[in-house]
Amino acid sequence: MPLGFGFFGALLALIYLYLVPSPPAIWRSLAKTGSVLVLAVAVWWEGGASWAVVGLLAASLGDLALSRAGERAFQAGVAAFAVAQICFVLGFDVDVGAVLGLGGGPPWPLIGLLTAGALVALGLGSGGTLTRGLVAIYVPLLLGMGLMALASGDLWWIAGASLFIISDALIAASLFERVPALAKQRLAYLVWASYWPAVACLSVGFLVT
C-alpha cells in the first residue's frame, strides 16, 4: 500500500479512536468514514480488484451510518457491511460453491453459517424485526467471508477476516441488554482497535495478491 495513503488512513483511525466516547458529530463521522475511504482510494490508485474497491466503499458507507445515532442508522450500516462482505468474497476469487459444500451431499458449511446468523439474531436483547432480520443475513455473510479468506490461503486476507470477525463479535456482545454500560464503553474501543486493522489487512491483501 502507498505509504502516504496508509499513514493518512491510520492517522484518521487514531483520531476516531480518541473520539470513540464522544457523541455523534460531524468530525467524528468524518474521521471514521475517511479512515476506510482512504484505503478504498489506495486500492483503486494501485489498480486493485474492482470488487475490493466497491467493498471498501461500502464499508466506508457502513461506518458513516454507524457513526450516527438511532436504529435506522444501525440498519443502514448493517446493510452496507453486508454488501461489503459479498464484494470482499468476490475479490478473493475462490470457488464459493466448493467451499460451502454445494458440490454434493448436505452443505454443512452453509447450514452452519445460516444457523449462526439465526442464533445471533435471536439472542439480541434489543432491535426490531428488521434489525434482527438484517443481522440474521449479515452474520452468515461475515462468517462466510472468513471461510473464503481461509480457503484463499492468503495470510493478509486471513488476518483481516479474523480481526473483522472479532470486531463484529465485540459489537454483538455490546448489543446484549445485560452488558453493563461501562463494559460497553470499553468494548467500543476494542471494536475499533480490531476493525480498522482488519480492513487495512484486507486492503493490503488485495494489493499484493
Image: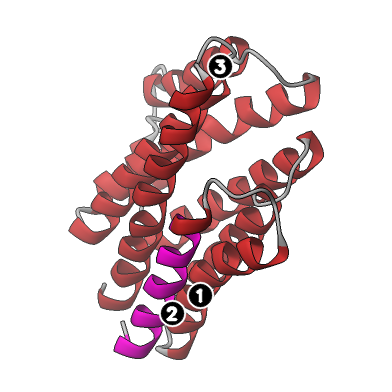
Residue 69 painted magenta: no
Q: Which residue is mark 1?
A: 40
Q: What percent of the width, then of the height, locates residue 89?
A: 45, 53
Q: What percent of the width, then of the height, locates residue 131?
A: 73, 28
- Indicate the amino acid at tag 3: Phe
Q: What percent of the width, then of the height, locates residue 203?
A: 37, 69
User: Which residue appears at 49% of the width and 28% of the height?
Assistant: 184
Q: What is the distance, in whole Å, between disc 3 and disc 1 at their CAs?
A: 32 Å
Q: Which residue is mark 2?
A: 43
- Quadrant of the image occupied by residue 135: top right
Can residue 82 be seen here? yes
Q: Which residue is mark 3?
A: 176
Range drawn in magenta: 2-17
User: Which residue appears at 64% of the width and 54% of the height?
Assistant: 62
Q: Earlier in the sequence, mark 3 or mark 1?
A: 1
Camera-nearest label, 2 or 3:
3
Q: What is the distance, in whole Å, between disc 2 and disc 3 at their CAs?
A: 36 Å
Q: Which mark is residue 59?
A: none
- Indicate the amino acid at tag 1: Ala
Can residue 98 be seen here? no
Left or right of 83? Residue 21 is left
Instruction: Tell me the crowding category of disc 2: few under 14, some 14 to 19, or many 20 or more residues within 10 angstroms, Cα based.
Output: many
Q: Quadrant of the C terminus?
A: bottom left
**Does the residue at mark 2 contact the one at mark 3 (Cβ under 8 Å)?**
no
Work out whether 162 lies above or below 117: below
Work out whether 8 lies above or below 25: below
How many marks are shown on the rendered structure?
A: 3
Q: Main secondary structure of the magenta part?
A: helix
Q: What percent of the width, then of the height, locates residue 66?
A: 65, 48
User: Which residue appears at 19% of the width and 53% of the height?
Assistant: 153
